[in-house]
Image: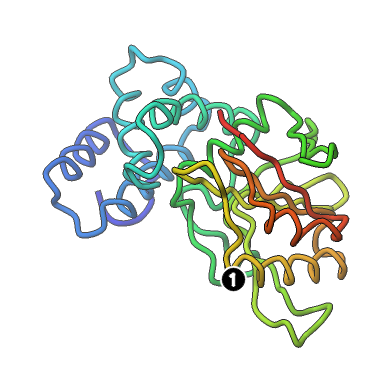
Amino acid sequence: MADGCNLYFTEKDLKDVESSLENHKVLNEGRFAANALDCLLKQDPDKFIRTLNDKNDPKHEMIFKMTLKSMGMGKVSSSEEMKIPSALKSVLKFTKNPTGLFTKQPTNRGAGSDRMKHPYELLTAATLVQKEKLYTTNGKSLTLYSTDRIDFGYKHAGDFFARSKGGTFESDVIISRMGGKQVGIDAKYRSEEICHLTNSTAKQIERIQNGINDGQLEGYFFTTNGVFSSTFHNAVKDIPGIGLCEKVNF
């Protein structure tokens, strides 16, 4: 299979991809796996979802392994890795053709962005699909409506409202509403319980505030599998459009 999307992707192609990955025959295994998955998904989204739903289908295990290769193995716990097929199925049943999943966003919608490279972003999106609401530490909620769509890896300009701030910020998960409104999510996975505020995240928060103030987003949420530090809480407490969602696990 060439390094491009062949819309006549066959079962033999899939086996060839698996063999190439297992025998380390490609230089960039993550990109190679992501490209193969993107081809399969574009070819027949319904069949892709059915395969994820059927553990007895031999392609189920292949897709599972390729998805881990695409997003990076060992980045979450082994028990969380086992949830990837179910999480992927949940997201694809909600939005069949999400951008930014296996290929990066088009330049006009995310210049400088990349495809999903951390499983926790997918797990966060799947949790939102399953629960429909994630509550923040101050009682507000991040809500997903049936008319919304889910995409990934969206870059926003961070200097429209206050150009002195400069730079961009990213939504690991982007929720698009009818009428054009959007809500961004930054999924922060931590192996330890506390998610601390870093210097780069502090600057990101300034840019997010600019993005909310100039109308790019109606809100932005940080999620973590642990809890946010008091410093993190203090950094966002006076910004109405930003929320913190803790202990978010699929």
Q: Position of residue 218 (x, y in %)?
A: 85, 55
Judge the density around disc 1: few (<14), some (14-19), many (≥20) Cα neighbours within 10 Å.
Answer: few
**Image position of 111 (left or right of 147):** left
Taking the spot 32% from the left edge, 39% from the top edge, the residue there is 66
Q: Position of residue 131 (x, y in %)?
A: 70, 25
Instruction: Identify which residue, 152 or 54, lies in the foreground.
Output: 152
Q: Number of labelled discs?
A: 1
In the image, residue 197 above or below residue 147: below
Instruction: Identify which residue, 85 or 164, lies in the foreground.
Output: 164
**Image position of 24 (left or right of 184):** left
Secondary-structure class at tag 1: helix
Taking the spot 20% from the left edge, 59% from the top edge, the residue there is 27
* Residue occupied by mark 1: 199
In the image, residue 5 above or below residue 93: below
Q: Position of residue 1 (x, y in %)?
A: 24, 48
**Image position of 119 (left or right of 210):** left
Q: Position of residue 135 (x, y in %)?
A: 77, 35
In the image, residue 219 above or below residue 235: above
Taking the spot 45% from the left edge, 26% from the top edge, the residue there is 83
Instruction: Identify which residue, 174 or 241, lies in the foreground.
Output: 241
Residue 82 lies in what quarter of the image? top left
